[in-house]
């Protein structure tokens, strides 16, 4: 195959993966990233005293596959520390419950955990039991139909207890996509719950040993450099320049510089891609369709404490406030050891109504939740440092009805592929989803260069405009 000049735009996990696959394929690759920091939604940077600040709490799941292949190829798989296979819920007034998995063939590894749970009554658990059948045995057609519903509608249609919605599934949907059950497609929750039930080990969670920059993105960038990839930070693209066949000819950087290429792969957040779509592509249903995608707001808070508040070395869920998922990284992450004191990282969601608050106000609300959740260890404790990161549009919003509109990585423009968590693959907007999208974008590009036919979806026939934004 002739060596091509491939321009990859966006250095999140999708763009980094694409860059590697295209370099592996023998092509000249230029990777352009708007920020000085790489890794996109899973990035980290150092503050003035050298502490790592992360864009958000990131957890690896046993169900992931392609990201582990990538990590093994780069020699960084050992940077994941797997935690005990248990889901721990922390509630107000120090109340706790957990789902502890067993060594047994699926779904028996998880079902006893659900039924032995002491927090829900037998009557409540029985309402869940019959709904487990479609989760376990539903086929693709069933899951596709469920995409028309919100998770809350599906839950109530099946008559599952409302307390299970508010105490068990609410933190799950908030942890998954930072959205409450009434705003998220049922399909997403059923897919994830089904995977956890069908596959032993799928729900096991792991953390990186240190910051994503030190333990993931940094080594991956060095690996790419070793393969001859040109990597440029502070290289935001502001315009796409097209040729007579509507093909992409060059991208224009914010400083006016033009970068030409034979092939282009745009690995941007979908709202950023929408801003760049040139006028000559606007009538293409593939691009019109993308305008229905938007990102979910989320806030990340880190707190350093003067003592140990939590002794748990794992992910923690909380249904009772604004911190649905969090971890004491002083326990989970060796590089974040804080002299035996707690160092928390919280996902704050739903964040829509909190985005306008000051950092102090957000930290106060988070701390109030921590005090309610750890009433024994918080009295007298002092926050020694706090950071707040707000992301206006983070992962794409999987609103009911949207799934059929997720685009293929192959695009209708003959020298363009796209990648990113929102594009079509099984793992939605996650680290695994981003890596899978990168692998598929590279595969589509390589197939096209080899003269093979690649299919573009959704086809114009499949495209339809969603009626209304749920939750409005
Ligand atoms: C708070 C939080 C917690 C999360 N927790 C988890 C988790 O526990 N587990 C999990 O699997 N996933 C988690 N995710 C999701 C995961 O981070 C994303 O799905 C994944 O990182 C998306 O990667 P991406 O490459 O598709 O997009 P991005 O990471 O958004 O990458 C896009 C890149 O494009 C760059 N860019 C934008 N505009 C331009 C431009 N004009 N020119 C050049 N470059 C541009 C951006 O700066 C960015 O680097 C979490 C996300 C958040 C926000």
Image (tube, rainbow, N blue to C red):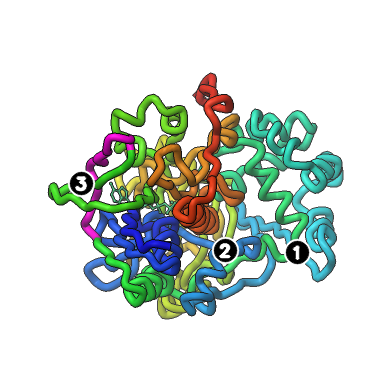
| Nearest to viewer (mark 1 / mark 3) | 3
- Asked if residue 285 is positioned above or below residue 408 in the image, the reply reads above
Identify the magenta region.
233-246
| Nearest to viewer (mark 2 / mark 3) | 3
Q: Are marks 1 and 3 in contact (CB under 8 Å)?
A: no
Q: Earlier in the sequence, mark 1 or mark 3?
A: 1
| Nearest to viewer (mark 2 / mark 1) | 2
**Dot 3 crowding, Cα within 10 Å, few <14, some 14–19, many 20+:** some
**Dot 1 crowding, Cα within 10 Å, few <14, some 14–19, many 20+:** many
Q: Position of residue 141 (x, y in %)?
A: 74, 36
Q: Earlier in the sequence, mark 2 or mark 1?
A: 2
Quadrant where the N terminus is found in the figure: bottom left
Which numbered tag is attached to residue 252?
3
Q: In the image, is residue 236 part of the stretch drawn in magenta?
A: yes
> Which residue is at the front of the view, 24 or 294?
24
Q: Are marks 2 and 3 in contact (CB under 8 Å)?
A: no
Q: Secondary structure at mark 3?
A: strand
Q: Measuring 65% from the left and 29% from the top, which residue is drawn there? A: 148
- Give the distance between the C-alpha atoms of the residues marked 2 and 1, in whole angstroms: 18 Å
Q: Which residue is mark 1?
A: 200
- Asked if residue 371 is positioned above or below residue 162 in the image, the reply reads below
- Is residue 151 left or right of 351 when viewed as pictured? right
Occupied quadrant, residue 301: bottom left
> Which residue is at the front of the view, 233 or 99?
233
Q: Secondary structure at mark 2?
A: helix
- Give the distance between the C-alpha atoms of the residues marked 1 and 3, in whole angstroms: 48 Å
Occupied quadrant, residue 295: top left
């Amino acid at each position: 195959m002739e060596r091509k000049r491939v321009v990859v735009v966006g250095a999140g996990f999708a763009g980094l993966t694409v860059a590697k696959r295209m370099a592996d394929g023998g092509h000249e690759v230029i990777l352009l990233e708007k920020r000085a920091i790489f890794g996109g939604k899973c990035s980290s940077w150092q503050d003035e005293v050298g502490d790592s600040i992360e864009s958000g709490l990131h957890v690896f799941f046993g169900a992931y596959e392609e990201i582990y292949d990538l990590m093994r190829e780069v020699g960084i798989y050992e940077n994941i520390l797997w935690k005990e296979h248990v889901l721990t819920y922390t509630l107000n007034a120090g109340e706790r419950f957990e789902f502890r998995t067993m060594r047994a063939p699926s779904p028996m590894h998880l079902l006893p955990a659900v039924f032995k749970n002491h927090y829900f009554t037998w009557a409540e658990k029985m309402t869940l039991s019959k709904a487990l059948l479609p989760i376990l045995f539903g086929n693709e057609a069933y899951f596709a139909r469920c995409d028309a519903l919100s998770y809350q509608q599906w839950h109530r249609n099946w008559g599952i207890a409302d307390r299970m919605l508010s105490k068990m599934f609410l933190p799950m949907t908030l942890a998954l996509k930072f959205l409450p059950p009434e705003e998220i497609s049922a399909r997403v929750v059923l897919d994830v719950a089904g995977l956890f039930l069908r596959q032993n080990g799928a729900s096991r969670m792991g953390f990186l040993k240190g910051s994503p920059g030190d333990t993931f993105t940094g080594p991956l960038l060095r690996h790419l450099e070793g393969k001859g990839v040109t990597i440029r930070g502070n290289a935001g693209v502001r315009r796409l320049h097209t040729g007579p066949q509507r093909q992409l000819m060059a991208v224009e950087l914010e400083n006016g510089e033009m970068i030409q290429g034979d092939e282009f792969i745009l690995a941007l957040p979908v709202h950023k891609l929408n801003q760049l779509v040139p006028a000559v592509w606007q009538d293409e249903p593939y691009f019109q369709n993308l305008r229905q995608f938007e990102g979910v707001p989320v806030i990340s808070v880190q707190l350093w404490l003067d003592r140990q508040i939590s002794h748990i070395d794992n992910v923690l869920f909380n249904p009772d406030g604004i911190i649905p998922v969090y971890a004491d990284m002083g326990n989970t992450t060796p590089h974040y050891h804080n002299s035996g004191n707690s160092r928390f990282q919280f996902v704050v969601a739903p964040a829509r109504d909190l985005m306008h608050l000051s950092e102090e106000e957000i930290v106060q609300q988070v701390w109030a939740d921590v005090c309610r959740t750890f009433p024994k260890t918080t009295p007298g404790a002092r926050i020694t440092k706090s950071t707040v990161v707000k992301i206006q549009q983070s992962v794409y919003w999987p609103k009911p009805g949207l799934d059929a509109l997720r685009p293929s990585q192959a695009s209708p423009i003959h020298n363009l592929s796209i990648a990113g968590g929102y594009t079509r693959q099984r793992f939605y907007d996650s680290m695994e989803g981003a890596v899978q999208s990168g692998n598929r974008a590279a595969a589509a590009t390589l197939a096209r260069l080899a003269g093979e036919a690649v299919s573009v979806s959704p086809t114009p026939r499949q495209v339809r405009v969603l009626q209304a934004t749920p939750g409005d």
